[in-house]
Image (cartoon, rainbow, N blue to C red):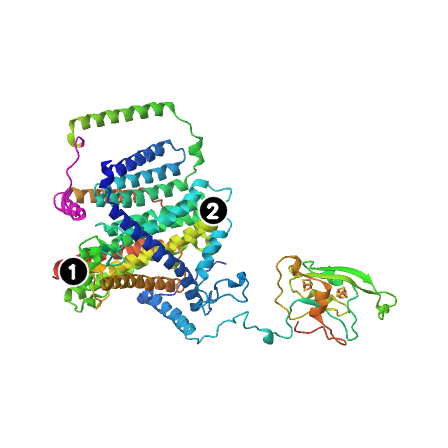
Amino acid sequence: MDFINDIPWLLIAASVAKTLFLIFLIVLPIVSYTVYAERRVSALIQDRLGPNRTGFPTSLLGFHKDLQLFLGGLGQPVADAVKFLLKEEFTPGHVNKFYFWLAPVLAMVPALSTLAVLPFGNYMFGQKMVVADVNVGILYVFAIASIGVYGIVLAGWSSNSKYPFLGGIRATSQMISYELSLGLSAVPVLMIIGNLNLSDAIQYQIDNGWLLLPFTDGKLTLRELLLWIPVGISFIVFTISMFAETNRLPFDLPESETELVAGYHTEYSSMKFALFFLGEYAAMIAGSSVIVVLFLGGWHLPFLPINTLESSTTPAGMALGLIHISVFFAKVIALLIFFIWVRWTLPRFRFDQLMKLGWLYLFEIALVNIFITAAILALVK
Amino acid sequence: MSPILFWLFTALMLAFGVSVILNRNPVASALSLVASFLCLSALFVGLDAFFIGVIQVLVYAGAVMVLFLFIIMLLDLRAEHRRHFNRLVLVGGSLVSAGFVIALLQVLSVFPAGAKPFPALGVARLDDVRQVGITLFTRFNLPFQTVGVLILVAAVGVIVLSRRELK
Amino acid sequence: MAYTVRRPNLTFWEKIYLPNIVAGLAITFKHLRKMLQGETKVVMQYPEEKWDAHLPEYYRGAPTLVTDEHGRERCVSCQLCEFICPPRAITITPGELASDSKFAKVEKAPKAFEIDMSRCIYCGLCEEVCPEQAIYLRKDYAVTGENRADMVHHKDKLYELGGTMPGLVHKWNPEK
Ligand code: SF4
Ligand code: SF4
């Protein structure tokens, strides 16, 4: 029984604690409130009000009115969740049962697994705030993101009806196409940072200023000024590809309501549908987090002191650690709101336009961008 | 890597590998292959070879197999169900695989690498991406570039061959 | 005949798309800001604010039965409305007036009169067809119930909603 002692129990316990904290206390609440924000922001943009009165149903207990807490409507995600749980779980007779059940899981799990390598804070309780600090961080993100397409493909195929099938086909071709520009547009950033580890990416940005805003360290050298061009281009390409990868609106062809009913999840109901829905939003959070880590300095905020491994057990260090985590997720939420804002501004692309944009423009731009970065890195010291 | 995990992933990988050939449904086969790749990459990760492990997922599970699935989905799957075993193919296949196993055993008997475990690496974080890059672009630069050109030629060839003349 | 749609010639900035995206984002942001600052007049907050005061004269709400100024039921259960009703929402059981009744000359009155409000489409045909000007679409629109039986308006309810309609009413309201 030697190997039992070999198992690093402390590491496993810490990882499990971090995972649970990240998923249940941060990501899932953000997911459900992003859905709420989506509805409120879209309503405000369209001169409506949106869900603004879901409170706690105290009237069910015999009170005269429902209890309205602070802003009305904040109970909406809870109500949605209860509704999803209680709805009838219906599996149509013509589907391929096993894969039909597997698909929603495959849609949700990759989106959440991406979060494993993201450094969402500095130190807390003498622990680095990242579940797995691997040195191929960004590649891991891309690998898991590319697995994410299986959920959609299987949903489309196993539903055994035409609209989901078309949605699945579209999703596959779209995600394969945009994965290329996604990966290529991240290359200049990795060349500048010189490392694939995401914690090191943040460390680099602490030392040299955030990549997109290189003056955050207080100085702006010629090199940084020149690198601003390729970084800006790769930021734009990366963000656009991220929209396409997460099937967000200008690129939401896999589920375009006007043509495909609901696309790949047409045949799904109740909690299985909710898993697709949540998976999509979790993927959005993962994507925004990657953007924050690569371009916007991660959990770092200029002028804010940084705690260390040793100080993170003291109260002051803990407070700082909490602030770091909040800064990270504040940036992520800002990006999510941007996602929503874009969604309610732009109309949907046509399929040929989508393919043309991906293959003829973004791919080439990302490729040329790599050479520009290489030239600047080689010529300007 | 804990031996439990090693045996677990090995067993899973082999089980999925067997299910690739036993499944009559092509989609199930393809997905088993994906699962098998994932277990394989878990084995790589267990050896601290993160780069290879991740690339395994990224390239094979994430890109190649998605394309496979994409094509399979467009085919008529019922034709596959109706097909019966061809005895000649069965015999031929077993002969080929038996030959392969014999060859493998011979190689393994001469090659002593599997006999004892490698010593631990001794570095906490292996800089494997950089190592692979440096090796690829210095020692093997010419073969690497040649392979790149070859693949490019193949890709262009495929496009030219598959393009139908537009009237 | 087929014809070619002329595509507009786009300038360079329009072709690279990004400036127009930013312009679009600015427009949506303007709407968002105006909503947040309360500059946009939004839709009515329904249960608290109601539009009852603004209902037009010709509004078609729930169909009701009316009595005249002597308290007589105007309906003579001729059943024309029952026949004309497109979704067959009306069910009438005709009855005879007792010979000692004050209005015995009218001879008939409905024994039961039911309108299934879960079927009614508020078309107003019953009102138009009625020879006795007995059925009117009034301004009640919040018809609710917890089950199908609740949604059926019986005779009492219909008279309660309708009230009295004295004299000869000009029913051919041109706007209705
Ligand atoms: S409401 Fe008018 S149309 Fe209907 S039965 Fe009575 S009198 Fe006839
Ligand atoms: S309004 Fe139209 S649908 Fe309603 S009861 Fe009258 S005739 Fe029937």
Q: At which x and y percent is residue B44?
A: 23, 41
Q: Which residue is mark 2?
A: A162
Checking the image for residue A376, the label placed there is 1
Q: Is residue B115 magenta?
A: yes
Q: Tell me which amino acid carries mark 2.
A: Lys
Q: At which x and y percent is residue B105?
A: 21, 26
Which portion, as a residue range, is magenta?
B114-142
Q: Which of B62 and A259 lies nearest the eye of the viewer?
A: B62
- Chain name for mark 2: A
Q: Is mark 2 within 8 Å of ligand 2?
A: no
Q: Tell me which amino acid carries mark 1.
A: Ile
Residue C15 seen in this snapshot: no
Q: Residue furthest right?
A: C99
Q: Is residue B86 above or below residue A310?
A: above
In the displayed structure image, the side of residue C110 where residue A319 appears, left or right = left
| Image region (quadrant) for ligand 1 | bottom right
Q: Is residue B3 magenta?
A: no
Circles 2, 1 touching at the beta carbon (< 8 Å): no
Helix, strand or loop for disc 1: helix
In the image, what residue occupies the spot 23% across and 38% down? A3
In the displayed structure image, the side of residue A259 where residue C167 appears, left or right = right
For label 2, the crowd category at 10 Å Cα-Cα, with few meaning under 14, some 14 to 19 and many 20 or more, is some
Quote the CA–CA distance across marks 2 and 1.
50 Å
For label 1, the crowd category at 10 Å Cα-Cα, with few meaning under 14, some 14 to 19 and many 20 or more, is some
Q: Quadrant of the C terminus of chain C?
A: bottom right
In the displayed structure image, the side of residue A229 where residue C130 appears, left or right = right
Picture quadrant of residue C66: bottom right
